[in-house]
Amino acid sequence: MQEQLSDRINNLATSQTLAMAAKARELKAEGKDIIGLSLGEPDFNTPDFIKEAAIQAINDNYNSYTPVDGYVELKDAIINKFKRDNDLTYDRSQIVVSTGAKQSLANAAMVILNPGDEVILPCPYWVSYAEIVKLAEGVPVEVPTTVDTDFKMTPEQLEAAITPKTKMIWYSSPCNPSGMVYSKEELRALADVLVKYPNIIVVSDEIYEHINFVGDHASMAQFEDMYDRVITVNGVSKAFAMTGWRIGYIGAPAWIARACNKMQGQITSGANCIAQRAVITALEAPVSKIDYMVDTFKKRRKLIIDLLNEIEGFKTTEPEGAFYVFPNVSYFFGKTIKGHKIENATDFSLFLLEEALVATVTGDAFGNPDCIRISYAASEAQIEEALKRIKKVLAEA
Ligand SMILES: Cc1ncc(COP(=O)(O)O)c(C=O)c1O
C-alpha cells in the first residue's frame, strides 16, 4: 500500500538531539569509541529513596487508572513544592500532572492555540518548542539572541516581536540549551512589556529550576499582575534524574488546567500510577537531597569551560544553570579541516562526531545556527577525553 501519512506528521521535524544520538549509536555499533555529549539527561541514577517509594507503590497495588490530572496526594505535594520553592500559591484545581513536562507543553499548545496564532520563542529555545507549536497549528516567531548578550531577550526585542496575532510566549529559565537564567529584575522588565498586552499567555518552563549555579530562581507567576496568565511548567526528569519515569506538571489558571485535563483525558488518561507515587516522595523531600548532583554539575561546568577556553574558536558564556554549554563556533565557518568543509554549525557538529568521535548537537536545532550544544551530563573523565580529542582535530584548522 502507498504510504498515506498526514501532512501533520510529514511536516514535523525529527528531534535533532535524538537524531544525533541515533547517529552516535550507529557509529558505536561499528565499533567506534564515541563520547556522547548530545543528550539532555543526567548521568546519575534515580536516588534510592525515590526508587523505594516506587517499589512500595507496586507492593501496595497501585495499578489502576489514576485521576486524569494526577493523584490528589501528588497534587498536594506539588502545591507544597510551589509554595516552598517558588512562593507560588495554587490550589488543586490549578494543577495538572502529565506524562513528562513535554506533555505539559503539548497540552498548553493544544488548548490555547488556534491556527495562525503566533508564539514568541526567544532563541535559542528547547528543541521541541517550535515543533509542538506547529503541531498545534501555531506559528513560532523566533527572537534571536547571541552569546554577546548572554542569550537573553531584551524587553525591546519582546515588544518588537508582538503583533495582534501573538497568543503566547514560551521560554525556559534556566535555559536549555544556553544555560542562561533570567533574574527577577530581568523577568520584571519583560513583564512590564507583557502587562500592556493582557491577552498574551506565558509558558514559563522551569524544569531546570534546581540546577542553578547563581542562586535564586525566579518565576514569572510570582508577579501579581502576571499570575493569572502564566503556565508554570516543571517536572522531575532533570533535578531528580528521573527522565524515564515521565512525570511533569503545571500550575496554571484553573480554566487552563481544566482544559489540559480534558485534553489528556482523551489522549493518555493520566500519567503512570507508580511514577506518580514515587514523585510524591521526591517532591516532599528537602531539596538538599539532590545537592550532590548539582555540586557535581557545577564542578563539571568549570572543567568544560576551562577546557573550551583553551581551544581557539569557541566563544562561550558561563552558563548559570542546566547542564549545557552553547558555544558560538562561527569562527570555523568557511574553513576546511581534515578534508571537511565547514559551512555551518551542523557541519561542525558532524565533523566533531566523525573525526573526534564526540557527539554534540547543532545549534540549528535550537534556532541558533552559529552555536553547538555540548552537554556536560557526563563524567569528568569523559569530558576531559572529549575536549582533548576536539582540541587535537581542530589543531589542523
Ligand atoms: C527545557 C525543557 N523542557 C522540557 C523538557 C521535557 O522534560 P520531560 O522529560 O519532563 O518531558 C526538557 C527535556 O529535555 C527540557 O530540556
Image (cartoon, rainbow, N blue to C red):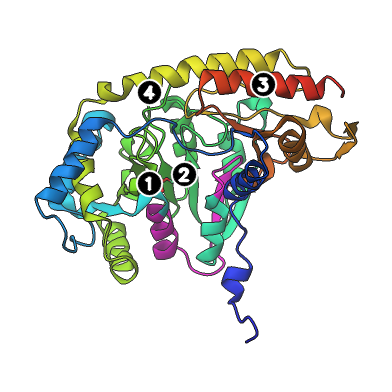
Q: Which secondary structure, mark 2?
A: helix
**Mark 2: few, some, or many residues within 10 Å (few <14, many ≥20)?**
many
Residue 182 placement (x, y as % from top left):
47, 29
223 left or right of 319 in image: left
Q: Mark 3 sits on what residue? A: 387
What are the residue bounds of the magenta stretch? 103-127
Residue at left 57%, top 71%?
8
Residue 79 placement (x, y as % from top left):
19, 41
11 left or right of 390 in image: left
Quarter, ligand 1: top left
Asked whether disc 2 touches disc 1, contact meaning CB atoms under 8 Å apart, the reply is no
Asked whether disc 4 touches disc 1, contact meaning CB atoms under 8 Å apart, the reply is no
Residue 322 placement (x, y as % from top left):
47, 29
Please tell me which of labels 1 and 3 falls first in the chain: 1
Asked whether disc 1 touches disc 3, contact meaning CB atoms under 8 Å apart, the reply is no
Between 80 and 224, the one nearer to me in the picture: 80
Q: Mark 1 sits on what residue? A: 244
Identify residue type, mark 3: Leu
